[in-house]
Image (cartoon, grey):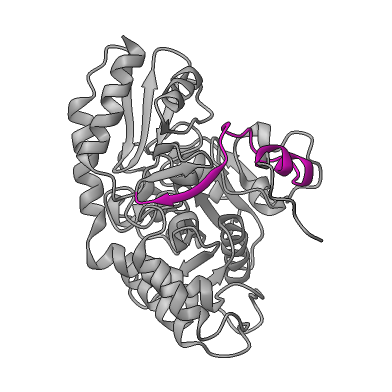
Amino acid sequence: MTVDTTEKTDWKALEEQYVLPTYKKFPLSLERGKGNYVYDENGEKYLDLYAGHAVTILGHNPKVVVDALHAQTDKLLFYSNLVHSRIRAEAARSLVSLCEVKGGKVFFCNSGAEANENAMTIARIVTKRSMIVTTSGSFHGRTAGALGATGIAKYKASRPGLATDLEEVPFGDLNAAAVALDKNAAAFLVEPIQSMAGVIVPPPGYLQGLETLCRARGALLIFDEVQTGLGRTGAPSAAWCYGARPHLQTFAKALGSGVPCGAVVASEEIGASLKPGDLGSTFGGGPLACAAIKATCDEIRWNRMWEQAEGTAAILRSSFKFPQLKEIRGKGLLIGLVFDRPAREIRDALLKEHILVGLSEDPSVVRLLPPLTITGKEINILRKALGRILA
């Protein structure tokens, strides 16, 4: 089959013809990215403050990751977990070192939903219990088990057959958590910061309180760090940021700088409880993904990029003084701007200014999930654009 290239192709129409619908898309067809910017098929440049759902944490096409992928493609594209792999070992060591989990071990998979599914599986294996406690407002993925654990009702509507043995409690309520954990729970699964719900931060002492409750009741504490991890919150992980020690942490999105991958990091005590055959994945821990994981984690750790994230966030918080801006939520570069008007209107107006931002379940919140490489100059571009929009 040959493709006629004499006329310009409408790629948006072609995608809609052949690809099942997922998100309501921006009216863009992107062709390339570099640093903190992306470019559409007409060469128009956009400042990316959303990073494709918090994925491109080092910016688009970071040289360190691209070089690592090129080097790996010349060696070995794929073999499964049936064999040992140098790059898999190095990627696991890099992730554990970044998270500062002494004696930690990693299970690699392919997405955040898979990571959360496997974390729940680990908890059930280790505790020999079945129930998982989750929180209202949470989002843990779209596979059956992860979606069952999600606390945003619209994602579960008209979807029968989701995983059972789950109990949902209010986010931030330690008393409700204690009652649920008393029902012989296997684990408490929680996002340290609820990004999709509108960037909801935990009350002081909540995450440490969950750790105390879980350890007292023999349940595992699982931190879903798919959006909060890898330096985004101004610390190597949200666990580090909030001073809590979960038994399990899940990672994805930014983990491979855009290469699909996921991971569960288990504490030393939990890792020692698992045996071959308890978990498995054909593609999880593949050489290409692990090359990207190692390069990403090393770059963040060696350059302490969480400090840059915290510094840039401080610039934003100190300079955004619009009367229409009611609150700035979040930690580091996981930011929710709460306005006195529909966030969608501001998001669409910013798109006309060639700036990409995100929304949430809170209709008043504009979400910012930029690369950690974002600068004060680019924050100022956003500030000036908002000034024009809100004038």
Q: Residue at x 54, y 50 (%)?
A: 181
* Camera-nearest residue between 101 and 284: 284
Given the current orientation, which residue lies at the most extreme bottom position? 83
| Above or below 277: residue 120 | above
The answer, for residue 324, to whether it is visible in the render is: yes
Q: Residue at x 49, y 30 (%)?
A: 359
Quarter holding the C terminus? Answer: top left
Question: Could you say where residue 159 lies in the image, as x and y percent from the top left?
Answer: 78, 40
The answer, for residue 267, to whether it is visible in the render is: no
- The stretch in magenta equals 11-35
* Camera-nearest residue between 277 and 310: 310
Question: Could you say where residue 31 lies in the image, as x and y percent from the top left?
Answer: 52, 48
Q: Is residue 269 magenta?
A: no
| Above or below 102: residue 332 | above
Given the current orientation, which residue lies at the most extreme top position? 391
| Above or below 125: residue 15 | above
Residue 113, quarter of the rendered image: bottom right
